[in-house]
Amino acid sequence: MDYIRDFLLGIWRLMQGMYVSLLNLLRRKVTEQYPENRGKVFPYERMRGCLVMPHNEHNQHRCTACGICEMNCPNGTIQVISKKEVDEVTGKEKRALDRYFYDIGSCTFCSLCTVSCPQDAIEWSNDFEHALFTRERLVYRLNREGSSLAKKERTAKAETV
């Protein structure tokens, strides 16, 4: 008697699986044909695609070369190279950003660098096409050639005091 019950139960479960397969066969396809419809694919707004350093219209950025992003990176993806400059107002030496390198090939997209940056100098873009033939081309320089630190804007409250 157990043999017949197990046999019928096996046939019933086989029919359930075939029913699910048949439903999936008849459903509308949802696969995106990515290379063909490249202009129609829009990633989500919060997607972490590539690290960028925004510059204003005067080729200025907000990075002070403090190195906090480099220290917080768990696998050494970021390399901040600074140089010494003399401040025009005070005459003291200060650090200035010379080169900012980002290796997207070893990045884990954890966002510890952007969260810890006190100046909000780096942020994520939605760029997601990073396929290359060599790893050396996955290292990007984020600061532009000849860029400088943006001057801090004075607020109305600071001017009245």
Image (tube, rainbow, N blue to C red):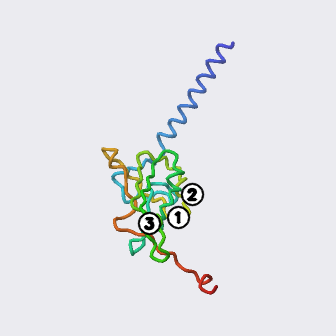
Q: CA separation, marks 2 and 3?
A: 17 Å
Name above or below for residue 10 compared with residue 107. above
CB atoms of marks 2 and 3 within 8 Å:
no
Residue hosting label 2: 116
Q: Earlier in the sequence, mark 1 or mark 3?
A: 3
Q: Is residue 74 above or below residue 43?
A: above
Q: Amino acid at mark 3?
A: Pro
Q: Residue at (43%, 45%) from the top-left corner?
A: 106
Read off the residue under disc 1: 120
Locate the N terminus by quadrant: top right
Q: Is there CB contact under 8 Å for labels 1 and 2? A: no
- Coordinates of residue 74 in the picture (x, y in percent): 52, 46
Q: Which quarter of the figure has residue 52? A: bottom left
132 above or below 4? below
In three-dimensional space, the C-alpha distance between marks 1 and 3, rounded to whole angstroms, equals 10 Å
Q: Earlier in the sequence, mark 2 or mark 3?
A: 3
Calculate the distance from the C-alpha at mark 1 to the C-alpha at mark 2. 8 Å
Dot 3 lies on which element?
Answer: loop
Q: What is the crowding at mark 1: few (fewer than 14 residues within 10 Å), some, or many (at least 20)? A: some
Of 152 and 12, which appears nearest the observer?
Answer: 152
| Residue 54 badge | 3
Q: Residue furthest left?
A: 133
Q: Furthest residue to the right?
A: 1
- Residue at 37% from the left image edge and 60% from the top image edge: 39
Which quarter of the figure is the C terminus placed in?
bottom right
Could you tell me the amino acid type at mark 2? Ser
**Type of amino acid at the residue the image marks with label 1:** Asp
From the viewer's perspective, is the residue at label 2 or at label 3 nearer?
2
